[in-house]
Image (tube, helix red, strand yellow):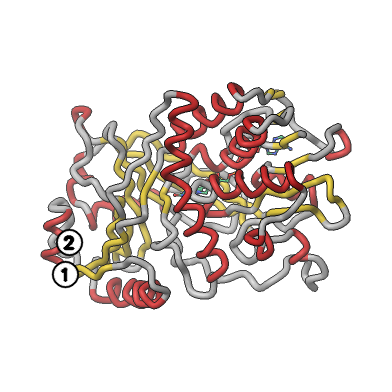
């Protein structure tokens, strides 16, 4: 079989398929150079359970449940630390208006039966004393975890190669150039040109900060919140790094703009004043592979049972890596689609008047 794209999705599929005995060739001129190179790595099916996305939420929850085993297997296969951390996520609102906005979402998430516990300001600061005294309230999502994509990608590559997958360093221009019984298109934003599927780039600018003197950041949870209407997240790593993100822009360039950096820094420092003393070490932008309904595209192309799409993971490609790899590997090996795939077929966009399928949802209040 062939896999086009060596991001988290393509590499994990290659690993799972090669480990089950298939001969796998992965095509990518620059493995790991896509959206995952800037991604924060939040595994946040609860905090990212949004109105009107029930099926996607179920897939996110199912994939997050596979993460502990997936991480353990990957570490066993490679010996690599992938920065998998389970302290949980604190969701906060800086002002009364921010809290009201976030509270609507928390109530929705609680209504789905998800583990979201409202916390008063004192309870928040008991958990994270570094939070600004101005923070008006929040909620804990203890099962929303994190991994470091910059550690995950090399580990996936090693695991795939150790299982026997071969990486070929060139781009695929046409699917007809790939000769394999089954081809999996896992090329992120590159999938659109290869397949015609409605995958569009959604730009995200993100900053990387570093605690002074090489110490760990002064907070342990992932912190997500609104600060004066600005959605922002802060992801602490054990080595002192903090990922501060991210914008959500309907653009395909990867320039970093002064306005975005200013807004992210202001929101981050408003929530955690100690960040003002941190080093600003990187400002980057990546392109999320977005789809019209924000959900991934998984399964055979219409009329092409030999070409499987595994793309369109948008803001969720890291959390969705384990389930995507398992479902696509099962499909390749057995030819039988798992029922979980039924909600995400490529042909759900066929015939839509604008070629784009369902109406896009509002994205202005999203984080990752
Ligand atoms: C700012 C930001 C923050 C994010 N935060 C999170 C987060 O916290 N949690 C989360 O779950 N997700 C997050 N994401 C989303 C996540 O990064 C993506 O969903 C994920 O990387 C998609 O994986 P992928 O393998 O499909 O694509 P990519 O990671 O984009 O990789 C695609 C690969 O395909 C290759 N390729 C492209 N075209 C071709 C071609 N024609 N031939 C050969 N190879 C090709 C590229 O070189 C690349 O290596 C974030 C994304 C951004 C931008």
Residue 23 percent coordinates (x, y): 74, 27
Q: Secondary structure at mark 1?
A: loop
Residue 321 percent coordinates (x, y): 55, 45
Q: Secondary structure at mark 2?
A: helix
Residue under label 2, please give it.
124
The quadrant of the image that shows the N terminus is top right
| Image side of residue 105 versus residue 21, left or right | left
Residue under label 1, please give it.
120
Place residue 347 in its image quadrant. Answer: bottom right
| Residue 252 vertical placement versus 99 (above, below) | above
- The reply to whether discs 1 and 2 touch (Cβ–Cβ < 8 Å) is yes
Residue 343 percent coordinates (x, y): 66, 65
Q: Where is ligand 1, by quadrant? A: top right
| Residue 266 vertical placement versus 94 (above, below) | above
Residue labelled 2 has its Cβ within 8 Å of some atom of ligand 1? no
| Residue at x 61% of width, y 44% of height | 325
The quadrant of the image that shows the C terminus is bottom left
| Residue at x 42% of width, y 40% of height | 283
One can see residue 337 in this view: yes
């Amino acid at each position: 079989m062939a896999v086009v794209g060596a991001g988290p999705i393509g590499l994990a599929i290659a690993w799972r398929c090669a480990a089950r005995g298939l001969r796998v060739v992965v095509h990518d001129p620059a493995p790991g150079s896509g959206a995952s190179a800037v991604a924060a790595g939040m595994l946040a099916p609860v905090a990212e359970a949004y109105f009107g996305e029930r099926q996607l939420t179920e897939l996110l929850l199912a994939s997050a449940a596979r993460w502990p085993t997936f991480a353990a297997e990957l570490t066993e296969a490679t010996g690599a630390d992938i920065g998998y951390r389970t302290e949980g996520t604190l969701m906060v609102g800086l002002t009364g208006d921010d809290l009201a906005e976030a509270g609507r979402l928390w109530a929705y998430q609680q209504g789905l039966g998800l583990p979201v516990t409202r916390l008063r300001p004192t309870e928040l600061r008991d958990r994270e004393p570094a939070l600004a005294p101005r923070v008006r309230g929040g909620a804990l999502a203890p099962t929303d975890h994190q991994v470091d994509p910059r550690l995950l990608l090399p580990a996936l590559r090693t695991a795939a190669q150790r299982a026997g997958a071969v990486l070929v360093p060139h781009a695929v221009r046409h699917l007809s150039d790939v000769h394999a019984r089954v081809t999996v298109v896992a090329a992120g934003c590159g999938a659109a040109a290869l397949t015609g599927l409605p995958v569009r780039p959604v730009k995200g600018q993100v900053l990387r900060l570093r605690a002074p003197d090489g110490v760990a950041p002064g907070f342990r949870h992932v912190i997500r919140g609104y600060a004066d209407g600005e959605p922002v997240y802060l992801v602490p790593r054990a080595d002192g790094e903090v990922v501060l993100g991210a914008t959500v822009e309907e653009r395909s360039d990867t320039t970093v703009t002064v306005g975005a950096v200013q807004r992210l820094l202001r929101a981050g420092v408003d929530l955690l004043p100690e960040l003002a003393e941190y080093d600003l070490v990187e400002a980057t932008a990546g392109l999320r592979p977005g789809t019209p309904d924000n959900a991934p595209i998984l399964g055979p192309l219409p009329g092409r049972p030999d070409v499987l799409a595994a793309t369109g993971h948008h803001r969720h490609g890291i959390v969705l890596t384990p389930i995507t790899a398992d479902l696509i590997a099962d499909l390749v090996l057995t030819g039988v689609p798992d029922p979980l795939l039924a909600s995400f077929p490529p042909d759900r966009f066929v015939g839509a008047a604008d070629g784009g399928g369902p109406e896009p949802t509002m994205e202005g209040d999203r984080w990752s």
